[in-house]
Image (tube, grey):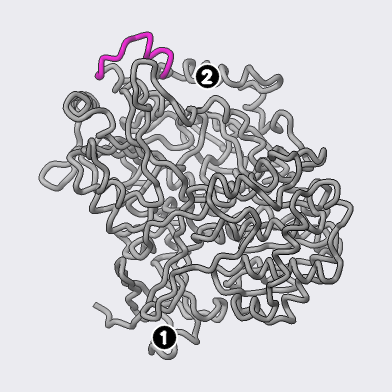
Amino acid sequence: MSTFNTVCPRNCYSTCSFKVKVQEGKLVSILAQPLNESTPAGPCIKGLSYIERNYSPDRILYPLQKKNGSFERVSWDKALDTISEKLKHLKKEDGSHSVLFYASSGMSGLLNGVSSNFWRMYGGATTVYGNLCWPAGLEATKLTLGENKHNIPSDIENAKLVVLWGKNPAESNIHQIVPIEKAQRKGAKLVVIDPRRTPSSERADLLLQPKPGTDGILALAVAKLILSKNYQDTEFIRRHVLGFEEFAQSLESLSIEAASRECGIPVAFIEELAEMMGVIKPMTLVPGYGMQRYSNGGQTTRCLLALSVITGNIGLAGACWHYANLQSYVFDAVKEPENYYPSDADKPFRRIIPTAVLGESMLKINDPPLKMAWVERGNPITQNPDSNKTLEAFRKLDFVVVVEQFMTDTAQEADIVLPAKTMFEQSDIVGSYWNPYVQLKQKITEPPGEVKPETEIYYWLAQKMEFSKDEIRSNIPEPNDEAIDNWLNKYLKQYEGLTLNRLKEGPILAPGLEEIAYSDFRFKTPSGKIELYSQQAKQLWGISELPEYVPLSTQNEKYPLNLMSPNTKNRIHSQFGNCATIKALHPTPIATLSPKDAKPRNIQHGDRIKVFNEQGELYIRADIDYSIRPGNVVIFNGYWNQEGGSPNLLTKGRETDIGHGTAFHDTKVEIIKVEDQ
């Protein structure tokens, strides 16, 4: 029996290291890897289900082509011949921008850049800009602090006050609970701010449940009270902060009572939070990603970050703005540049459309209109807003190729489905947006059936496209393990100490790591200081130079309930929900609502209900729970449409105020009880 070190490549905070035992070429067990001090206890229930996922009878193992509405197995030659002929025809007749290349975050890794290389060789494509996940918060942090980094995860145990604002690490970042509990055992206080009562809030000394989308005004009210009590860190502000006077002046007209009414938190509790934040140091503030998925999300994040700034909780042990840590993304510089112009063309390589408004943009775009889509590492029909519009857009295309492991909602719409590798079937380099390690996801088993890694798919497709040998050689590795290792080593060799052999032994701390972020108090902003007043905010995004609360505009008496679509511990977005292990824990989609909202609608626990608005409708089982603030309904993101429960049947495509994020949560709905079918 052999043991291999590897890392989970999913779009998840933790990026867990773990060990895999293999016997006679088959995965047999998954164990913890304590060398990663951020994830020493091993993976979550999803990670533990990898063996089942890898050998699932539902896994796609051969190329499939749709014929008369049904999929039939075809050879790789036939599949690639069909695709290449279509690509050649479209480029000649309509131009390369008639093809949409859509890739998302289904599996991270340095080799994903090969995909862009192929489409550059093709002459370009239509791609998406923006992100479904976190960019409003990233941009808000960058405007204020200059870059996105935070203290190493274990540093949280040095905090005397931990504030989880819209974050539920007990489910979405389980390893973060360990240093939080260590801090509590040392006497630290824990505050949780969340419209839901979650497993994380069960540990809290104080739980506040604001109205969704009003976190910004709650934060500004807390800031005003901190200043009124003279709790601010005057010396820190004097030395390191630009725009404090303007920020303080902007709060003068703010009424604490009006803020209380707006956010739904009693004044006494706002005062208690201000007292804790103003007096207890050091403080680590951990914001979640849900708040910045509103149309006011960027400004909301700036309002929250201002609390860390005015109290001096930046750059010290236990004092941290703990949003995103990109220090292990050491290969970002080698990724495709934002504005790539081929030397022999006037047009840019990419024509771009917003991912937040994908379906509508696909339908509207012309000159040329879209004729084909290639999808990999994503499930846009389920995961992008306005599933109905996205589905309509895909069905309008002449030809769709999807590279997938399972028959997802998007794969069902394909003309050709190509079988995708799992994480165990090709080596790659993986960073993290939480822990500070560079890690190797090494090849452990051979792909089953006729599965080919994406790099190999592109290699053989490039041959069919008759690209030159030199061009292929410089852009796509050959389809063998030695070539993949050589490809990865090209990037590793620029960093002393980073080698494949060392990475095979376990995770390595990122080169140049700052264990305490900003401990040198140098900030990559235009002024070199923390910028509460940011001219770039106005210049780049057209918002106020100062953190500001902007009320949501989605009030509608016809649809009185806020729809929230948070992550669940049982899925990584739309992945893992089809595993039997997960289905045993979470067999069917549910919509959670408060008894106060259920009673007047005559809805009881387990009833079948219709959730609807002007975008669409879905039918789902009701889960009545006192944990959720009245006025809200929760449907976890990641349910497939074929399960009947995707919340994106109800969301509208909207961008956030900054960062080109996706405002999923600006969604109002109504619910009614319906009879069982």
> Under tag 1, what secondary structure?
loop
**Span highlighted in magenta in the image:** 464-475
On the image, which quarter does residue 492 sit in? top right
For label 2, the residue is 485
Residue 472: in magenta span: yes
Q: Position of residue 389 (x, y in %)?
A: 28, 56
Write the residue at 65% across / 66% down: 200
Write the residue at 58% across / 38% down: 7
- Is residue 47 visible to us here? no
Which of the pair 35/446 is nearer the observer?
35
Q: Position of residue 583 (x, y in %)?
A: 42, 61
Amino acid under disc 1: Gln
Side of 406 relative to 250 (left or right): left
Write the residue at 71% across / 21% down: 497
On the image, which quarter does residue 167 sit in? bottom right
Q: Give the main secondary structure, helix, strand or loop, of the magenta stretch.
A: helix
482 to 276, vertically: above or below = above
Side of 177 relative to 410 (left or right): right
For label 1, the residue is 604
Which quarter of the figure is the C terminus placed in?
bottom left
On the image, which quarter does residue 286 sit in? bottom right
How packed mark 1 is, by other alpha carbons closer than 10 Å (few <14, some 14-19, many 20 or more), is some
650 to 65, vertically: above or below = below
- Is residue 393 visible to us here? yes
Q: Position of residue 569 (x, y in %)?
A: 53, 59
232 to 253, vertically: above or below = above
